[in-house]
Amino acid sequence: MTHQSIILGTGPAGLTAAVYLARANMNPLVIEGPEPGGQLTLTTEVENFPGFPDGIMGPELMDNMKKQAERFGAEFKRGWVTDVKVDQRPFKLSVDGLGELETQTLIISTGASAKLLEIPGEKENIGKGVSTCATCDGFFFRNKKVVIIGGGDSAMEEANFLTKFANEVQIVHRRTELRASKIMQDRAKVNEKITWALNKTPVEMISDGMKITGVKVKDSDSGVEEVIETDGIFVAIGHNPNTEFLNGQLDMDEKGYLIVEPGTTNTNIPGVFACGDVQDQNYRQAITAAGTGCMAAMDAERFLEGEAAIDWSQSLS
Ligand SMILES: Cc1cc2nc3c(=O)[nH]c(=O)nc-3n(C[C@H](O)[C@H](O)[C@H](O)COP(=O)(O)OP(=O)(O)OC[C@H]3O[C@@H](n4cnc5c(N)ncnc54)[C@H](O)[C@@H]3O)c2cc1C
């Protein structure tokens, strides 16, 4: 059986695409991937998704989106894509747990995973004081002290942003030199709320069982350990777009983010569309992911309609 459309990923982008395609009677098949519900299942309260004046828990929001897509006939399957062949249509997918699948159009919404330090106390405290998204969680740290880990442009940008809320933002970086551009460093250096703990490697995140209380760091030269007290820890060491399974078959930038034609979700292969964080290293928000998910569904629908119109005109001539 060849599907009209397969959607990869069930974050806000994939689920919004599923709602739109299901309502357009395109019977999308949605592959859930390794993280059903996507990144928002890692967090607690989401306060900036429009339509929820009192906020909503991340997993509940994603569950609602899935139910909404199912209501219109979207089909969901567990499994993740290990290989694709997009050199000819129908496109072929190898899906772990499901075998080979074929589809006329493909929507890639596999997201981008925040890199973590992989140290004790980190993963288990995400949403309890450890965050990978200042835009998302900065608001929860009004008049508090936070630590930001990283030395690149995004760490500097997030540190500046966090000073709108926190009393003190301490940048912890394992080297003395920062990777960030000079202009971003200069901006951070003149900000009076930003303090520095350079040449310190984080080794453990410390919690009192309810919330984060500190981060243990080791001096990169002497090896001497100390605990920096803090109310929150932002890990800003970059993201990995989930595109390895494509084996370079689609145009990507040097970091592996998919490149789309501006103002659309078209990749360089007609019939393959990309939406959400997998093609966006700038905004990385649930609402922008959902917005581009809507665009991908409409692009896929119009693509197939365009082909059907060509078939018709040929059969009439
Ligand atoms: C802790 C945390 C808190 C956040 N808080 C907020 C917030 O408050 N507000 C906000 O707007 N944003 C927030 N964000 C950001 C937001 O979650 C992301 O911008 C959004 O989830 C991106 O949506 P997406 O659909 O592009 O991808 P994701 O949510 O990343 O979903 C990717 C999907 O792709 C699937 N997948 C991956 N690889 C494969 C594969 N090979 N085959 C099949 N499927 C695959 C995964 O299983 C997953 O379902 C937060 C992020 C984090 C990490």
Image: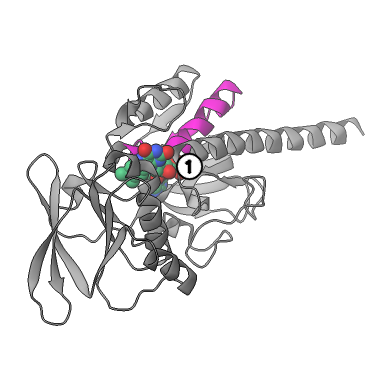
Q: Please tell me whether residue 222 is drawn above or below residue 195 in the rendered image.
A: below
Q: Please tell me whether residue 213 is drawn above or below residue 50 in the rendered image.
A: below
Residue 229 horizontal side relative to residue 81, left or right: left
Nearer to the camera, 272 or 112: 112
For the C terminus, which image quadrant? top right
Quarter occupied by residue 136: top left
Nearer to the camera, 295 or 250: 295
Magenta stretch contains residue 25:
yes
State the residue lying farthest toward the right.
Answer: 317
Whereabouts is ligand 1, in terms of quadrant? Answer: top left
Q: Which residue is mark 1?
A: 101
State the residue lying farthest toward the front.
Answer: 192
Nearer to the camera, 138 or 295: 138
Horizontal and vertical percent position of residue 121: 13, 53
Q: Please tell me whether residue 178 is drawn above or below residue 5 in the rendered image.
A: below
Nearer to the camera, 266 or 163: 163
Secondary structure under badge 1?
strand
- Amino acid at dot 1: Leu
Horizontal and vertical percent position of residue 108: 51, 46
The residue at the point 38 percent across, 68 percent down is 189
Horizontal and vertical percent position of residue 65: 42, 26
Is residue 128 in sight in this rendering?
Answer: yes
State the residue lying farthest toward the bottom.
Answer: 221
Which range is magenta? Answer: 11-40
